[in-house]
Structure formats: structure tokens, C-alpha cells
């Protein structure tokens, strides 16, 4: 068996299994070995039935006393109930839809069962446990639990891992020896062996720490190396010092805040220095990031360069285009637009004008980074809602010019300490002040009992000529989740207000339908938009005054704050109504935070404190490479440690070109190579 060969060489992996593994991004045997378990089942300890604890996953050894077969529920699914016992007590075990195991168990024989203990009407039971023919006193040890896809079972992937785990001896360590020694890390082969087949809890912890350290180290080394590479490049763009931001700002009908001026000063230093700009602009919804971007574009264009502004959705890109066109026309700056839905002739004319330099500013979606889009003299690149774009897409856009300045903007509040690490390749500026006169959004929370009153309030706002969002956590009704869906709410509101224009919007719809509905809502044709979080980013409707969020307990604080930011964009007083059906203390704390604060950065800090590890955000949401085992929140201490270690390594070898760091460079490049070509030495 070859470590770098296809997983198809493993016994039992046929054509169908190969296709399923491909969906999990597992192509080679090495990929399989680096596919870590998501959890573990501790089958090394047996618990007596009399000592079982509620809602805990537990292993019991028990004898089958009684088997009851039956049919129940929808389509008469076959059920299997087993009464089992040990020396201390009796337990009922239940399997629903159990046709495949109807004849597996035998009375008076002993089996091992692993599952969660529940209490239903005073009767304790274990539903759908894993089961094994009893090994007597022999321990099953600690079993890995892997993430799966349709067509692959847990037992199959465990079996395949066992068959190829011996190949870890061929995997060479890629971390520098001084880093391993300084941090007292176990070696890589030991870590890989014990992440899949841990002998005990201590060895598992050692293995996890090593692999978490590795993953975060590669992430930080990659991000810091990008930054060092950009700083080392020869500066070829020279913006005119005679072109002042104030030349543009003085033509506006409003005054900028001190925070905006402070950020513009930082941007100006970048643009007039000998290093390329790589700056993140963080600012709450409504803090005025767009006007900062406009002033930056003005300086770049008046200095003889083109600029590009990329947004994640077509409607947001169009809104930027319309605003820039209106504001820049008096200054003789021509703005163009590009998206994937444009007609062929219109696209051809736009691309021709862009290449000839007749378009000074190009606004669009990711269509801007496609092949065939050629600029005449690109100097500045801006991406809006940066967390919707990856590092690769930013680099692809920047490659349309030579040593261009890069500015990225986000309204997603991230605590500064974390932002420094996540956006390790960028300098960070924060607009932490709101423009004067902006009305604060009034936020109120209620439970299902107050739901009807919330909708009555929404109706009053609609009668005033306003518009409203109703956000739900689900698209379709779910039997397993106690939450309302867009379809349910849409049907309910259509029955309630048949004379009102109500539409549904969710991520599973065709892009053309989504664009049409968002455009109609923007134009005011639609009065109430029932949607999922697809509207979190990319729609600006000043006439919308109500954001009603169903099952608010199912959203994170930062996400609730983002949704709230969809309203309050006009002159009218706006409202955010939270229908919170959570009964826990944490859900009430979160509601109180939303009601009492409109500070996105404060809310983000609280979100970090209250939410479970990994729930604050996923790496993909912020455009970073996927992390297989590390968690940016849970492992923040390790993250800070590896950042310093990465700095030490890159201080002597910024692009990891030394022979001693060759394996590390390959590993880092592979991590950042998930979407398209990326090289530290570019």
C-alpha cells in the first residue's frame, strides 16, 4: 500500500466508496490518515445500570432478558425493544426503524451497549445505542468517531484507518526541531497513531495538543509569510501627495467622525509610504466604512490609477455601484459594473472600456477575478464584507495589477485580540464611532406568549408604509428541531394578511430568483420578506424599519447583531423584535445583552464568553483555510503561542525557502491550496 496513492487501494473501498470519500476531500491514504476523529467513545469503563446518569453517553454490559418486536408510527416502521439487565438493575433499550437488526439479539446472551441515557415519564432507557457482542472482561478501549457522508459507515472508516495506520512511519515531521523541543511536543508519528487509536486518555491529550499546535502553526506561518512577502515587494505605485482626501470629503453633505478621520490618516500613511497597503477596516453597521472607501478610491484614481471594489452579492455590488456613480460623476470619475448575470454584449463593452482605461472604478461580484478581466492600470483593490471572501480571492484580485494596495472591509465585529490573529496578514483599523444623529435601533425580547403582539406591532409599521424582515433559523419544517421555518411563517402570514405583498428568501433558491426578490424588496414592492440568514449581508433597504427574529435562541449574538443592522438605515425609528423560546439562563443573558447594547464589539466579546467552543464562527466564514482539529476560540492560548513561534521561524526564513524548512513550506502551501494555486514564494 502506498501512502500517497489512492484510497481505492484499501480493501473494501470500491467505486461508490471512493466517490463518497472524495466528497469528504479524502483522495489519498495520506488524506485518510490526516482525517481526524471529531469525537471519541470511551469504552474502557463499564457502568453498572444502577449507577447510570441521565443524558450521559455510557457503556454497559448486560444480558438480554426479553425481546419485543413491533410496528409503529409512519408507514408502520419496525421497532425493537430489548429488556436487559446486569447484577444491579434493568434497562430498556429501544431501536426505531430496526428492520436491519430484528434477528441480531438472542435472549440470555450478553452484549455491550453504548449510548445516551434518557428519562421518559419516569422510565430510564437507551435509544439507538451502538452494540457489540460482549467481549467479557476485555476492554474495547477508546473508539474514534469520525464525521461521515452518505454511503460510509462509522465501522467502515474505523476499519480503513486500522488497515493503513502503520503507514504513519513513512510520514516525516515537518515542524522545526527547535519548535518541537521548545514546546515539549510529542513526535508526529506518535500523535497520528494516538489520534486514531489512543491507548489511554493521556496519550490522546498529547496527540491532540501536538496536532492542534501543528495546524495553528501552519495557519499563522502562512498568514505571516503573506504579510512579509507583501512588505518585501518593491513599491512601484506612487500616489500623489497633492491629492488629498479632503478634496473629496469637502464635497459631501455631511461631516465625518473623528474615528473616520483617524482611519483615513492610517490609510494615507500606507498610500504614501514605500510599502503596499494591506489593511482591514473594521466598523459596525452604519459606522461609515463606505465613505472611507470612497475617499481612498478618489485619491487612487486622481493619482492616475484604477480601483476595483468587490462585494459578495450582486445586489450589494449594485448598491455600491449606484452610490459611487452618483458621488463620483461630478469629479469626472467613471464607474463601471461587472457581474456574472450581465449580457454578453454589455460585458464585452465593459471589459473593453476597462482595459483601455476608460473605466476608472470597477464595481462587481467575484466575476471581477475571473480570467479575461484586464485592467489598464490597477492600483487599489477593495473587498467589502471580507469574511465572505477567502485569502485566495483577495490575492487573485490583487494579481490583476502590480503591487496593488489592498483594503478589506467588514461589519462583522471581531474582538481586536482575535482579529490580529485571524487576519494575521493585514494591518487593522477600527471605526469605533457612529455618525451623530443616527437613531439607535430599539430592541425588545419576548417568548412565544408575546409572539402575537410582536406581529401586531409589525403590522402597524407596515400600515405606516414601512417594510419588515422576518428571519427564521430553518427553511423547511423539521421534526427533530423545535423551531419555525420560513415556509411555515410565510404560510401563516399569507393567511393572516392576504392583502399584503409577502415573499420568501432562502439560500436554496436559484440565484436569479434571489436577486429578483431582493431587488423587489429594495424597490419597495415587497412589504414583508420572510428569510433565513441569507439576508445577513448584502441588502440595504432604508425603508425597512422592523427586524423580527423567530427562535432568536438559535442564533449567535454576533449574528443577531448583524441581522439587526439590516434595519435602521433610514430616517425612521427602527425596531428589532426577538422571539426567544430558549428556557436556559444563557439564552436569557444573550437576550438581555442584545436589548441593552448596540455596540458590536462589546457584543462580540460577550459572544465569545457565552457561546460554546467553535460556535462563534467557522473558519470558512472568515475566508481562512479549513481547520480539521483546531478551534480558533477554544484554543486561543495555543493560537497566541504558535503566533510567536511562527514569528521566530519566519524571522530567519521569511518564505520558508531553507532546506530545513522545506517540508514545513510544503505543508503550509497545501493548507492554503484548497481553492486555487497559492505559493509563499509568489
Image (tube, grey):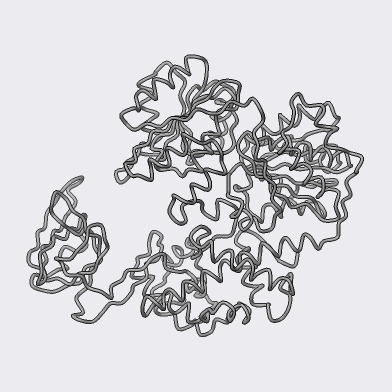
Which residue occupies 37% across, 36% down? 580
Nearer-the-camera pick, 233 or 440: 440
Residue 387: percent from left, percent from top? 60, 48
Quadrant where the C terminus sits is: bottom right
When the figure is inspected, residue 464 is found, relative to residue 597, above or below; the finding is above
Q: Residue at x 75, y 41 (%)?
A: 262
Instruction: Please state if 114 lies on the left or on the right of 235 as rendered.
Output: left
Residue 417 screen position, x and y as percent: 60, 54
- Which quadrant holds residue 453? top left
Front-most of residues 448 and 39: 448
Tell me if 301 is positioned left or right of 179 in this view. Answer: right
What is the total number of numbered labels drawn onto the structure image? Answer: 0
Place residue 675 in its image quadrant. bottom right
* Residue at 33%, 70% in the rendered image: 155
Quarter of the image where one finds residue 659: bottom right
Residue 203 location (% of width, % of height): 41, 78
Q: Is residue 404 above or below residue 323?
A: below
Name above or below for residue 327 compared with residue 165. above
Q: Tell me what residue is drawn at x 86 percent, y 41 percent.
A: 356
Q: Decide: is 30 above or below 362.
A: below
Is 191 on the left or on the right of 661, as rendered?
left
Amino acid at each position: 500500500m502506498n501512502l500517497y496513492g489512492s484510497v481505492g487501494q484499501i480493501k473494501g473501498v470500491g467505486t461508490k466508496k471512493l466517490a463518497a470519500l472524495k466528497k469528504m476531500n479524502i483522495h489519498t491514504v495520506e488524506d485518510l490518515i490526516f482525517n481526524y476523529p471529531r469525537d471519541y467513545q470511551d469504552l474502557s469503563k463499564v457502568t453498572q445500570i444502577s449507577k447510570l446518569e441521565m443524558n450521559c453517553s455510557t457503556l454497559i454490559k448486560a444480558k438480554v432478558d426479553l425481546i419485543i418486536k413491533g410496528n409503529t408510527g409512519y408507514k408502520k416502521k419496525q421497532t425493537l425493544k430489548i429488556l436487559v439487565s446486569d447484577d444491579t438493575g434493568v434497562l430498556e433499550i429501544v431501536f426505531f426503524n430496526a428492520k436491519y437488526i430484528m434477528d441480531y439479539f438472542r435472549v440470555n446472551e450478553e452484549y455491550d451497549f453504548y449510548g445516551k441515557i434518557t428519562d421518559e415519564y419516569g422510565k430510564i432507557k437507551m435509544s439507538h445505542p451502538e452494540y457489540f457482542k460482549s467481549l467479557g472482561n476485555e476492554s474495547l478501549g477508546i473508539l474514534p468517531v469520525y464525521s461521515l457522508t452518505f454511503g460510509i459507515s462509522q465501522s467502515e472508516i474505523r476499519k480503513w484507518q486500522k488497515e493503513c495506520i502503520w503507514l504513519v512511519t513513512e510520514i516525516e515531521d515537518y515542524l522545526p526541531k527547535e519548535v518541537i523541543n521548545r514546546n515539549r511536543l510529542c513526535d508526529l508519528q506518535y500523535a497520528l497513531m494516538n489520534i486514531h487509536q489512543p491507548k489511554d486518555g493521556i496519550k490522546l491529550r498529547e496527540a491532540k495538543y501536538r496536532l492542534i499546535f501543528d495546524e495553528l502553526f501552519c495557519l499563522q506561518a502562512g498568514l505571516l509569510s503573506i504579510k512579509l512577502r507583501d512588505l518585501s515587494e518593491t513599491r512601484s505605485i506612487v500616489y500623489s501627495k497633492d491629492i488629498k482626501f479632503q478634496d473629496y470629503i469637502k464635497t459631501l453633505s455631511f461631516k465625518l467622525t473623528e474615528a473616520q478621520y483617524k482611519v483615513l490618516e492610517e490609510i494615507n500613511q500606507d498610500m504614501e509610504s514605500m510599502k503596499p497597503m494591506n489593511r482591514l477596516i473594521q466598523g459596525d453597521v452604519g459606522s461609515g466604512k463606505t465613505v472611507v472607501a470612497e475617499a481612498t478610491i478618489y485619491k487612487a484614481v486622481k493619482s492616475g490609477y484604477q480601483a476595483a471594489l468587490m462585494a459578495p452579492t450582486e445586489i450589494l455590488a449594485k448598491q455600491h455601484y449606484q452610490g459611487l456613480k452618483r458621488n463620483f460623476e461630478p469629479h469626472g470619475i467613471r464607474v463601471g459594473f461587472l457581474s456574472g448575470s450581465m449580457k454578453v454584449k454589455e460585458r464585452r463593452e465593459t471589459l473593453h472600456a476597462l482595459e483601455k482605461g476608460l473605466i476608472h472604478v470597477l464595481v462587481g461580484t467575484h466575476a471581477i477575478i475571473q480570467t479575461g478581466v484586464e485592467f489598464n492600470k490597477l492600483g487599489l483593490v477593495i473587498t467589502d464584507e471580507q469574511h465572505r471572501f477567502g485569502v485566495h480571492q483577495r490575492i487573485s484580485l490583487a494579481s490583476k495589477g502590480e503591487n496593488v494596495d489592498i483594503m478589506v472591509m467588514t461589519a462583522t465585529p471581531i474582538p481586536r485580540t482575535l482579529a490580529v490573529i485571524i487576519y494575521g496578514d493585514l494591518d487593522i483599523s477600527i471605526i469605533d464611532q457612529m455618525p451623530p444623529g443616527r437613531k439607535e435601533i430599539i430592541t425588545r425580547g419576548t417568548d412565544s406568549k408575546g409572539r402575537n403582539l410582536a406581529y401586531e406591532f409589525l403590522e402597524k409599521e407596515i400600515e405606516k408604509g414601512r417594510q419588515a424582515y422576518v428571519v427564521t433559523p430553518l427553511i423547511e419544517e423539521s421534526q427533530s428541531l423545535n423551531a419555525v421555518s420560513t415556509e411555515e411563517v410565510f404560510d401563516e402570514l399569507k393567511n393572516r394578511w392576504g392583502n399584503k405583498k409577502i415573499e420568501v428568501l432562502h439560500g436554496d433558491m436559484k440565484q436569479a430568483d434571489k436577486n429578483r426578490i431582493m431587488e423587489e424588496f429594495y424597490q419597495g414592492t415587497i412589504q414583508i420578506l420572510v428569510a433565513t440568514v441569507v439576508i445577513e449581508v448584502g441588502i440595504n433597504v432604508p425603508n425597512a424599519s422592523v427586524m423580527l427574529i423567530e427562535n432568536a435562541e438559535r442564533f449567535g449574538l454576533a449574528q443577531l447583531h448583524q441581522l439587526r443592522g439590516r434595519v435602521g438605515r433610514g430616517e425612521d425609528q427602527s425596531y428589532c423584535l426577538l422571539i426567544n423560546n430558549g428556557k436556559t439562563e444563557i439564552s436569557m443573558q444573550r437576550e438581555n445583552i442584545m436589548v441593552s447594547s448596540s455596540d458590536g464589539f462589546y457584543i462580540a466579546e460577550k459572544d465569545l464568553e457565552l457561546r460554546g467552543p467553535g460556535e462563534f464562527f467557522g473558519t470558512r466564514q472568515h475566508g481562512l483555510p479549513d481547520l480539521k482539529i483546531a478551534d480558533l476560540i477554544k484554543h486561543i492560548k495555543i493560537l497566541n503561542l504558535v503566533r510567536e513561534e511562527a514569528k521566530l521561524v519566519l524571522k530567519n526564513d521569511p518564505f520558508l525557502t531553507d532546506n530545513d524548512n522545506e517540508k514545513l513550506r510544503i505543508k503550509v502551501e497545501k493548507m492554503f491550496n484548497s481553492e486555487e494555486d497559492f505559493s509563499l514564494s509568489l
